[in-house]
């Protein structure tokens, strides 16, 4: 369409990527993400799948070309596949991607591929079943590895492991996880732990910097810097003579905010303009009060670009988490 409005903020950054959390619920309780006894939202407090679909359609009409479905665990939401099928039909949506803990992939990989999902990120923090259980509190490593294999067999454009390293827990597994990724011909990203939500482990002492992980891996592998960028906090390296790319997602050590191209939508329909700040608008009332008219929703989304903050404000030394929101709620 000519003269179609697009999302550009006051710093000239174009927003063409949304991350949508479709549930705050999860079958795991990873120590850095959730407390052991989480209180979850009631059904009516969460966007319906129809509302999720409408919202994405509106964002795509405003120039968004990439959508990541996340959670919580998106694949534990009942009928989640319907949403993927709807989104897969949207003209203008070039990249439909998913972040998952992998527990449901054995059953759902085929249908996701068919719906049009291009790439999948699967969180795996340890290759040791006992440790995996300790970190996720409820997860079964075998099930996740079977789901990963099912996804590899489907031939997605790319599969990436996401790993959060924690000192004294799994920080000795960085090289093993990279070797596993090389053997499987997939990618891997190391995510520095972020101070999101109150959890019952000590973040400051468990924090592992990506600079240290990179140094350790450079001793073992020949790594070639890559200029590839997704407009986010990840920096990539290629492992020589392999199919594998290693990403380092470093919200603390890098200022990635200048090139930020994304916004997040919680499962309650709150549009957060930055992962580490409180600036947001509530889209749910706009959806529910105007079931047949997208105009108020479009106006509010365009207007929200005025309040997208310049950058985040994470500081591990602070006693309080910078943001009380849990990652599972905002969507990782
Ligand atoms: N349940 C799915 C999963 O685990 O992949 C999707 C949601 S999860 C919130 C998305 C990503 O956020 C995961 O890779 C997880 O490791 C990461 N994550 C969760 N809490 C985090 C935190 N406090 N700091 C850094 N990464 C975190
Ligand atoms: Fe669940 Fe993902 Fe959070 Fe782990 S990181 S508790 S799998 S939402």
Image (tube, helix red, strand yellow):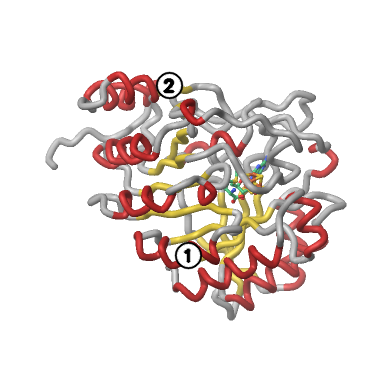
Identified at 50% across, 59% down, the residue is 120
Q: Residues within 10 Å of mark 2 (few under 14, many from 20)?
A: some
Of the pair 233 and 50, the residue shown nearer to us: 50
Of the pair 136 and 216, the residue shown nearer to us: 136
Q: Which residue is mark 2?
A: 281
Per the image, label 2 sits on a secondary structure element best described as: strand
How far apart are the two marked residues, 2 and 1, measured between alpha carbons?
34 Å
Q: Earlier in the sequence, mark 2 or mark 1?
A: 1
Per the image, label 1 sits on a secondary structure element best described as: helix
Q: Which residue is mark 1?
A: 109
- 40 versus 248 height, above or below: above
Point out residue 320 in the picture as x, y percentages from the top left corner: 75, 24
Identified at 50% across, 22% down, the residue is 279
Point out residue 197 in the picture as x, y percentages from the top left corner: 68, 31
Point out residue 190 in the picture as x, y percentages from the top left corner: 66, 55
- 49 versus 221 height, above or below: above
Point out residue 43 in the picture as x, y percentages from the top left corner: 50, 31
């Amino acid at each position: 369409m000519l003269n179609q409005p697009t999302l550009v903020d006051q710093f000239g950054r174009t927003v063409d990527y949304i991350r949508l959390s479709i549930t705050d619920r999860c079958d795991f309780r990873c120590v850095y993400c959730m407390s052991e006894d989480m209180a979850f939202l009631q059904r009516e407090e969460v966007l319906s799948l129809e509302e999720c679909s409408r919202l994405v359609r509106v964002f795509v009409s405003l120039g968004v070309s990439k959508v990541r479905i996340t959670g919580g665990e998106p694949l534990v939401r009942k009928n989640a596949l319907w949403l993927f099928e709807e989104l897969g039909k949207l003209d203008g949506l070039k990249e439909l991607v998913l972040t998952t803990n992998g527990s449901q992939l054995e059953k759902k990989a085929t249908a996701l591929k068919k719906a049009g999902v291009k790439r999948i990120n699967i969180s795996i923090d340890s290759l040791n079943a006992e440790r995996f259980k300790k970190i996720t509190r409820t997860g079964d490593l075998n099930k996740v590895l079977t789901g990963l294999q099912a996804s590899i067999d489907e031939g997605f454009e790319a599969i990436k492991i996401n790993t959060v390293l924690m000192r004294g827990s799994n920080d000795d597994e960085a090289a093993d996880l990279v070797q596993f990724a090389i053997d499987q011909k997939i990618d891997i990203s190391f995510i520095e732990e972020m101070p999101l939500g109150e959890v019952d482990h000590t973040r400051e002492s468990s924090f592992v910097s990506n600079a240290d992980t990179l140094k350790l891996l450079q001793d073992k592998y020949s790594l070639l810097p890559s200029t590839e960028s997704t407009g986010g906090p990840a920096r990539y390296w290629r492992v020589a003579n392999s199919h594998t790319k290693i990403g380092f997602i470093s919200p603390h050590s890098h200022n990635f905010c200048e090139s930020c191209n994304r916004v997040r939508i919680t499962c309650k329909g709150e549009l957060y303009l930055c992962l580490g700040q409180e600036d947001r608008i509530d889209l749910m009332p706009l959806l529910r009060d105007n079931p047949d008219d997208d105009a108020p929703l479009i106006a509010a989304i365009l207007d929200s670009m005025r309040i997208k903050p310049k950058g985040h404000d994470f500081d591990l030394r602070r006693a309080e988490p910078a943001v009380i929101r849990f990652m599972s709620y905002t969507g990782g």
